Image (tube, rainbow, N blue to C red):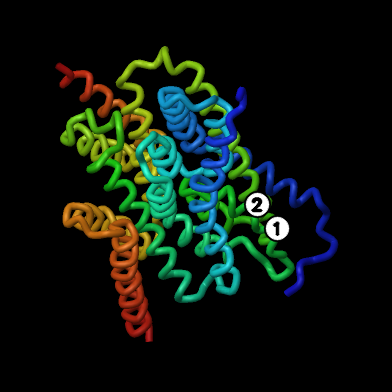
Amino acid sequence: MATPSSEPAAVTSGGFLLGCRTALTSVFAFVISFTYIGFGALCHDYGLSMGWAMLSTALQWAGPAQVILVTGLAPGISLIETAVAVSLSSVRLFPIVVALIPVVRHESTRLWQLIVPVHFMAISVWIESMRMAPRLARDQRIAFCNGVGLTLLSIGVIFTGVGYVIQALLPAIFAAGAMFMTPISFLVSAARNAKLLLDKLALGLGLAIGPAMAFAKVEFDLLWTGIIAGTIAYGAHRLQRSRGRSAAS
Amino acid sequence: MNFPMEPYLALLLIGFLPSEVWRWLGLLFGRGLDENSEIILWVRAVATALVAAVVARIVLFPPGALAAVPVEVRLAALGLGFLAFLVFRRSAFAGVIVGEAVLIGGAAALAP
């Protein structure tokens, strides 16, 4: 179905502003501030410039990849090795983007309109987008994602600069607290989004299988955990659905 | 030279590109799929499990400063943070604040 031609531009900007507001009131505004204060301080310690640190947040927008890059730029470490490590740490961006696209696009969406929201995609932005976008009219969803993404990315860039400047004032324990922001916020907000058995099982199994894979020193442990735990969760979801169907008939 | 280009070139070539390529690939693969298709349900489950795996890895094999906090404290902070999330009507803020408080409090209490 074509989108109604009578839709004024105001509706789209409504989606954008709603995205900004959603981002500002989400736990991630708070989490990203502290995470990137930690990253800014790290860049200062490694002798990089403040402009570089802020540009890294704007361009990479993937916490683990940024930390790997900064620590991997030290002399004596192969640049190829660092590039591979950065790339492997960002594989998770692939499935989240694949899962997002069918939710936000409509038939008249052009490829270039998706380049920007796709750059904003990180687990935080994805979680907020997947939670809210299905409640919006389809033609507002891309604008909504842009609002969430631009707001959180801006917060990240600003607080990278803040962390760089106040680095000397931070107590050592702060760095540990800043790093813990990522796992605790991912866990509770992914749990909040988990409505179906599919999501709950995927989350629980990922928490159980992830450490097993890592302890066994399996290569690409994150990827394997995602595929194995995700497939079991999906299988259970199908089983539950077919049982529900046969019970109903 | 006052403005060395090397770190910026490194940022672009070994920071931005190897990471961004996954977003572009995701866009190319996701474009042809239907929101309610079976494959999208499976991909969503895989993505969610990957998020859980990232959580487990950072807590069990932490980078840098977090490694100085004992593993028992890290696990307790994650568990109690999740408990607080459930108790306070699924509030992500409650989970994060309680988790951080346990982590920092525990690390401070156990510090030599």
Q: Is residue A130 visible?
A: yes
Q: Position of residue A221 (x, y in %)?
A: 28, 58
| Location of mark 1 (residue) | A113
Vertical comparison of A24 with A2: above or below: above
Point 35% across, 76% down: residue = A238
> Which residue is at the front of the view, A57 or A26?
A57
Q: CA distance from mark 2 to mark 1?
A: 7 Å
Say whether mark 1 and mark 2 are on the same chain: yes
Q: Position of residue B28 (x, y in %)?
A: 58, 67
Q: Is residue A1 left or right of residue A196?
A: right
> Which residue is at the front of the view, A189 or A59?
A59
Q: Is residue B79 left or right of residue B11?
A: left
Q: Position of residue A165 (x, y in %)?
A: 51, 17
Vertical comparison of A78 with A232: above or below: above
Chain to which the residue tagged by mark 2 belongs: A
Point 80% across, 66% down: residue = A4
For the C terminus of chain B, the quadrant is top left
Q: Position of residue B88 (x, y in %)?
A: 35, 37
Chain to which the residue tagged by mark 1 belongs: A
Q: Dot 2: what SS?
A: helix
> Which residue is at the front of the view, B18 or B61?
B18
Point 44% across, 18% down: residue = A167
Q: Is residue A155 visible?
A: no
Point 55% across, 68% down: residue = B30
Q: Amino acid at mark 1?
A: Gln
- Mark 2 and mark 1 in contact? Answer it, CB < 8 Å: yes
| Location of mark 2 (residue) | A116
For the N terminus of chain B, the quadrant is top right
Q: Dot 1: what SS?
A: helix
